[in-house]
Image (spheres, rainbow, N blue to C red):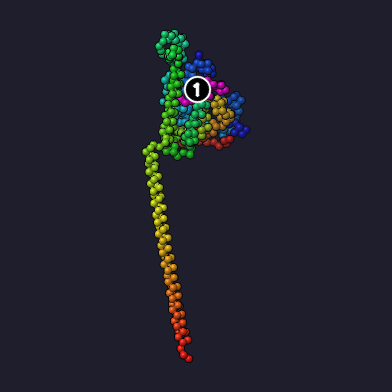
């Protein structure tokens, strides 16, 4: 039977270095996917992922188990992502103000008469729309929608209250809905529900 | 009930994390609130759209599998074999005899160490590159700078000399001009003086002549 993350951490701290190997194999793809969705660049995501696991390897010996290993791992990865994005001079991947630029890059993507858009184009639109979100909302969207973390796990990873996670998620979803609807993607009509 | 108060419960329901009580609250509310019903539908739809974005296949390609968990029994057997010296590599473990001692390193440690070494080499190269750019200028560059400074100083000197010459010329001109005026003035004064003197002499002559004539 496969050992849990906590058991592997214990084993590593007792000197079984191969336990890290197992943690790496277990989490590498997911962490890489999350990083890619946050920073939006493949090679950069690989660099950051490598750096994240190196940091984890160096620090795992003194990991105090105040959080789950996975939350800790995502935390390391997201901190590195934030550093990298800050070095891009604080710009989001694509500001919503650059909507004109998005139009240029994706001509004719305003949907046909039925409002349907090909799935490949939809993927591109979604990636750009997520990339245009403020970093805080983007992180929560990625962790919730793509990594499937619970609200509690996300709160633990980001070290914010659950209510804050939900606020950021809600705002992110509303912005994304608006952006996709603007481009003729099928969706519910905008509803004037006040955003708290 | 204010729709805003239900927002967190709505999210819990959307993501399957709602307690039975929350679910019931949301269900009852949306049954009578068209706005919230539409809002939930809208959020569900955008969630579906978000799933269209998949990570590129190249990103999900597994890296070469790291060594599987070691097999202690085989490792022990290998260590026994190594008691007679030599090296042995198997099942992801590498063993060396160094300085008469058996050293076991896992492929994980080696791989990690390799990653660390590569990263350090990258950082060293970056530092060296920065140092090269910040390095002091070479002799040739210093000589070139000296030349530029000397040329600039020469230009400055010529400019100042030219200005001094011009100034001297103007001062001299003014001086000659003034001197001429003074001379002219003096000449005029002298002329007037001589005339007066001649006139006075003439008058004196008349007076003397008159004094000596018989009455």
Q: Nearer the viewer, residue B27 or A166?
A: A166
Q: Hey, which residue is sitting farthest bottom in the picture?
A: B215
Q: Quadrant of the N terminus of chain B?
A: top right
Magenta segment includes A60: yes
Q: Residue at x 41, y 10 (%)?
A: B85
Was residue B59 drawn as part of the magenta stretch in this picture? no
Residue A186 placement (x, y as % from top left): 47, 33
Q: Position of residue B170 (x, y in %)?
A: 41, 60
- Asked whether B98 or B80 is in front, the reply is B98
Q: Chain of mark 1?
A: A
Quadrant housing residue B124:
top left
- Residue B153 visible within the image: yes
How packed mark 1 is, by other alpha carbons closer than 10 Å (few <14, some 14-19, many 20 or more), is: few
Q: Residue at x 60, y 26 (%)?
A: B22
Magenta stretch secondary structure, dominant: helix
* Residue identified by numbered label 1: A58
Could you say which is closer to the camera, residue A33 or residue B39? A33
Say what secondary structure mark 1 lies in.
helix
- Against B111, residue B162 (above or below) is below
Instruction: Specify the segment rendered in magenta.
Output: A50-73
Q: In this rendering, does residue B49 appear at all?
A: no
**Between residues A17 and B43, which one lies in front from this camera angle?**
A17
| Rendered position, B8 above or below A4 | below
- Image coordinates for residue A36, horizontal then vertical, percent: 46, 28
Looking at the image, which residue is at 58% across and 25% down?
Answer: B18
- State the residue at coordinates (43%, 9%): B83
Residue A39: x %, y % from top left: 47, 31
Left or right, B7 with reference to B149:
right
Q: How many numbered marks appear? A: 1
């Amino acid at each position: 039977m496969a050992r849990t993350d906590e058991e592997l951490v214990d084993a590593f701290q007792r000197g079984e270095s191969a336990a890290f190997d197992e943690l790496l194999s277990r989490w590498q793809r997911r962490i890489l996917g999350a990083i890619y969705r946050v920073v939006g660049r493949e090679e950069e995501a690989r660099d950051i992922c490598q750096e994240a696991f190196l940091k984890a390897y160096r620090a795992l010996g003194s990991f105090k188990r105040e959080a789950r290993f996975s939350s800790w791992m995502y935390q390391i990865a997201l901190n590195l992502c934030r550093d990298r994005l800050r070095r891009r001079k604080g710009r989001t991947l694509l500001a919503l103000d650059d909507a004109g630029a998005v139009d240029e890059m994706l001509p004719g993507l305003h949907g046909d008469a039925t409002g349907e858009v090909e799935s490949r184009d939809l993927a591109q639109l979604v990636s750009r729309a997520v990339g245009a979100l403020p970093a805080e909302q983007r992180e929560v969207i990625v962790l919730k929608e793509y990594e499937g973390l619970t609200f509690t796990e996300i709160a633990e990873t980001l070290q914010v209250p659950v209510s804050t996670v939900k606020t950021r998620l809600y705002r992110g979803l509303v912005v994304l809905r608006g952006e996709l609807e603007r481009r003729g993607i099928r969706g519910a009509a905008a509803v004037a529900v006040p955003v708290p | 009930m204010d729709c805003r108060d239900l927002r967190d419960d709505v999210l819990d329901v959307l993501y399957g994390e709602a307690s039975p009580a929350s679910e019931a609250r949301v269900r009852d509310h949306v049954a009578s609130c068209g706005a919230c019903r539409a809002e939930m539908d809208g959020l569900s739809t955008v969630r579906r759209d978000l799933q269209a974005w998949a990570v590129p296949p190249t990103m999900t390609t597994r890296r070469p599998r790291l060594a599987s968990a070691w097999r202690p029994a085989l490792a022990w057997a290998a260590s026994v074999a190594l008691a007679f010296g030599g090296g042995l590599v198997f099942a992801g473990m590498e063993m060396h005899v160094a300085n008469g001692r058996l050293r076991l390193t896992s492929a994980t440690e080696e791989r990690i160490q390799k990653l660390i070494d590569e990263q350090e080499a990258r950082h060293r190269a970056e530092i060296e590159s920065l140092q090269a750019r910040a390095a002091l200028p070479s002799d040739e560059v210093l000589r070139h700078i000296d030349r530029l400074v000397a040329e600039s100083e020469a230009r400055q000197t010529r400019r100042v000399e030219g200005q001094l010459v011009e100034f001297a010329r103007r001062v001299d001109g003014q001086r000659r001009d003034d001197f001429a005026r003074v001379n002219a003035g003096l000449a005029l004064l002298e002329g007037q003086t001589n005339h007066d003197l001649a006139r006075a002499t003439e008058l004196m002559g008349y007076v003397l002549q008159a004094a000596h004539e018989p009455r």
